[in-house]
Image (cartoon, rainbow, N blue to C red):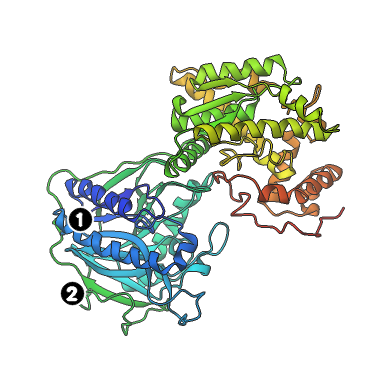
Amino acid sequence: MPTLRLALSQVNPSVGDLAGNADLVRSWTRQAADAGAQLVLFPEMMLTGYPVEDLVFRRSFVAASRAALERLAADLAADGLGEVPVVVGYLDADGPPQVSGDAEPGHGARNAAALLHGGAVVTRYFKHHLPNYGVFDEDRYFVPGETLTVVRIAGVDVALTICEDLWQAGGPFAAAREAGVGLVVNINGSPYELNKDDIRLPLVRRRAAEANATIAYVNMIGGQDELVFEGDSMIVSADGELLTRAPQFVEHLLVHDVDLPAATEPPAATDLPAATEPPAARTAAGLRVVRGALDGVPPTPSGPPAVGGLIEPVADEAEAWQALVLGLRDYVNKNRFPSVVLGLSGGIDSAVVAALAVDALGGDRVVGVSLPSQHSSEHSREDAADLAKRTGLDYRVEPIQPMVDGFLANLSLSGVAVENLQARVRGVILMALSNQEGHLVLTTGNKSELAVGYSTLYGDSVGGFNPIKDVWKTLVWRLAKWRNTDATRRGETPPIPENSIGKPPSAELSPGQLDSDSLPDYDVLDPILIGYVDGDLGRDGLVESGHDPAVVDKVLRLVDTAEYKRRQSAPGAKISMKAFGRDRRLPITNRWREHG
């Protein structure tokens, strides 16, 4: 039984940075070659970053992707790495975009994988299953492939697949079984959701059984706008054994020796044709099969076997915290902001956002501004100052009451209008600091508030990124407690004041104001919101789940009438199964209501 040393490169590409992403491939391939790898794998759309969205329609970008691939193959050979087979994802096209007037049936943009070897692009594979749910719109962008590429590497038949091919039964994995392959490579740009790692391993096991082959699953890490990719790369044997698993949320080279069945049938050719060339053979799964073999692959190194190790998944709160930190860090750094600024109220939401920002960027790149009004309590001011001292961020105090009074001297306002005026003055100050000093403004509204519209447009909602946009209020508290406990465990100062965690939440825009004056307690509110927003339950389903009908009616009315606010909110890292924005898309003008 041949042994193949695999290297799964769990790396962090940037959308549109073809040269930088190619450099990542070269440097990580060097590390893999130094470790004796015989096959190096990189994630889906590695060269272009993922997702590229409507850049797919820009023919200059497609041409640049194809040229970068050819150049990368030559550069790897020039680096002395030409003997090492490398699988890399990229954007390809075999015809005009499907949205153009000269589109050709069955041709267009392709989500592709290429095998590079000997300074050349040896063969290509086009993604077969195209997801069109949640954050994915791949039916809008790509044409599905209808060919399975099988390559003989060091005596083992290896099939190439991409991401969604793994998430659906049939297709490439059924074809791989009939083709008798020993290894299925699956390259991924699979976005993070809380507990997705618990779903992924059983899924890989099912596909391994379907293909009767070992699966090498490699996923990217990093943040891209609202999406976060957590890695969690792994190798699973044909009988379902987890052989090795990479850590989450960090770049990592997973090198592991895998014993695989020797190929039995002779390949159709030693020179692989392009994936678009139609071979005659078909499988029962309806895919054509292209076969070939590589010569000159390095032999399996002598000595002790390479063992990648097994990383156990972490607790939910630790996982979510790491995802939020990574999403914020990459949004700031990839968009080249030098620093961030946020309002520090002394409450739990701004405290958690500040702690996330310091973990992501360091205290020297975070500005926290206390913006007290006449209604701001002394304990809230003290809690904001305490957090700044604990985290080491740049702390400033800018009282807003003189500015509010200036407006009120010239406008006749009362009630909610005065409350919103205070929030908008705070927004103006934060945006002024952003303009003057170059900071990115972070907003601090949680998912529960966003759901029911408990925010002020152009006030507390103003800003460029919201780290907790997809975090329910009850989870905000859990994250705060976890972060403090984790700091204590490591002998560090807990970043979040206990007062911020323990006190009742309040916007402090009027005397004695509490969130509970306007909303149900969050322990009651969040389960209703989770059922309605994440689970798409209607009123009857929520009532049948045990929720009070009157409370359900109030909450659903608040959610339905706040869509216009959510549409104008800042982007934020997605960590749930259904985030506002990319996942949950509802019309603003909409008369449908869940009636009681």
Residue that appears at 53% across and 33% down: 436
Q: Disc number at residue 69?
A: none
Residue 366 vs 572, above or below: the answer is above
The answer to whether residue 361 shows anywhere in this view is yes
Which of 198/472 is in front? Answer: 472
Density class for disc 2 (Cα within 10 Å; few <14, some 14-19, many ≥20) is: some
Q: Callout 2, which amino acid?
A: Thr
Number of disc labels = 2
Q: State which quarter of the image contains the N terminus.
A: bottom left
On the image, the x and y values in percent for residue 13 come to: 37, 50
Residue that appears at 46% across and 20% down: 489
Q: Earlier in the sequence, mark 1 or mark 2?
A: 1
Which of 524/464 is in front? Answer: 464
Residue farthest front in this picture:
410
Residue that appears at 13% across and 56% down: 299
Q: Callout 1, which amino acid?
A: Gln
Q: Which residue is mark 2?
A: 270
Q: Is residue 35 left or right of residue 516?
A: left
Density class for disc 1 (Cα within 10 Å; few <14, some 14-19, many ≥20) is: many
* For the residues bearing labels 1 and 2, Cβ distance under 8 angstroms: no
Which of 113/383 is in front? Answer: 383
Q: Secondary structure at mark 2?
A: loop
On the image, the x and y values in percent for residue 199 come to: 50, 51
Q: Is residue 218 left or right of residue 154?
A: right
On the image, the x and y values in percent for residue 44 come to: 38, 58
Residue 132 vs 200, above or below: the answer is below
Q: Secondary structure at mark 1?
A: loop
Q: Is residue 295 left or right of residue 465?
A: left
Q: Which residue is mark 1?
A: 38
Residue that appears at 33% across and 76% down: 289
